[in-house]
Image: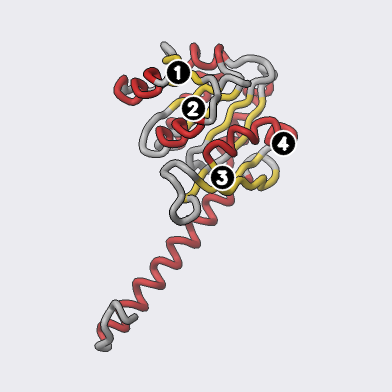
Amino acid sequence: METVGFIGLGNMGGPVAGHIQRAGFPMIVFDLREEATRPFEERGARVAESVGDLARQSDVILTALPMPRDVEQVAREIVAGVKPDAIYIDISTSPPALIRTLAPVFEQKGAHVLDAPVASGQPGAARGIHEVMVGGDRDIFERAESVFQAFGDQVTYAGPLGSGCICKLVHQMINSTVSQAIAEGLTLGAKAGVDVKTL
């Protein structure tokens, strides 16, 4: 079974990494906060000394980071240690141009790249179970699919590199538009005198 390296054990990354670990993958983790890595270490994961150290020991590397600039910085640190034929997967929310810019740098080292941002899973799903939208080479997606299935209740191959990011951004746009329409409709009905619960 491939060793999975996971960087970024925050509100999203922590639960996702937890599902991957519970699925039985050997894991190595890294986070700037020691308290975030401790539960994983207690369950048998190794804690890397640095991003580069994690990259050197991992077959599949995932990042779940707050902002695109964090993704870019950490990805460039991963490249320094990445093994040939390893797979780098970013599950953060970033513009498609970022992952497309990073891919050639990994290719120079013989490694592969997928973008796989996540959205909320099906209602009632366990925390950390997500809809996963994956962009990149289909053969590489299929190699990593067992990792995606460990934390995703809806895993979709979206197309070429960057397609996952595009799907995620479109989902966010639709969600925000629908939410605004619901809010306006409820406000209108309430101001017209109808009980909000009835609406």
Mark 1 and mark 4 in contact? Answer it, CB < 8 Å: no
Q: Residues within 10 Å of mark 1 (few under 14, many from 20)?
A: some
In this view, the mark in front (4 or 3) = 3
Q: Position of residue 83 (x, y in %)?
A: 63, 14
Q: CA distance from mark 1 to mark 4?
A: 29 Å
Q: Circle 1 sits in a helix, a strand or a loop, which is it?
A: loop
Q: Is residue 187 above or below residue 155?
A: below
Task: Identify the residue under disc 3.
Answer: 132
Q: Residues within 10 Å of mark 2 (few under 14, many from 20)?
A: many
The amino acid pointed to by label 1 is Ala
Q: Position of residue 146 (x, y in %)?
A: 63, 33
The amino acid pointed to by label 4 is Asp
Q: CA distance from mark 4 to mark 2?
A: 25 Å
Q: Residue at x 57, y 19 (%)?
A: 3
For marks 4 and 2, the one nearer the N-term is 2
What is the quadrant of residue 42 in the picture?
top left
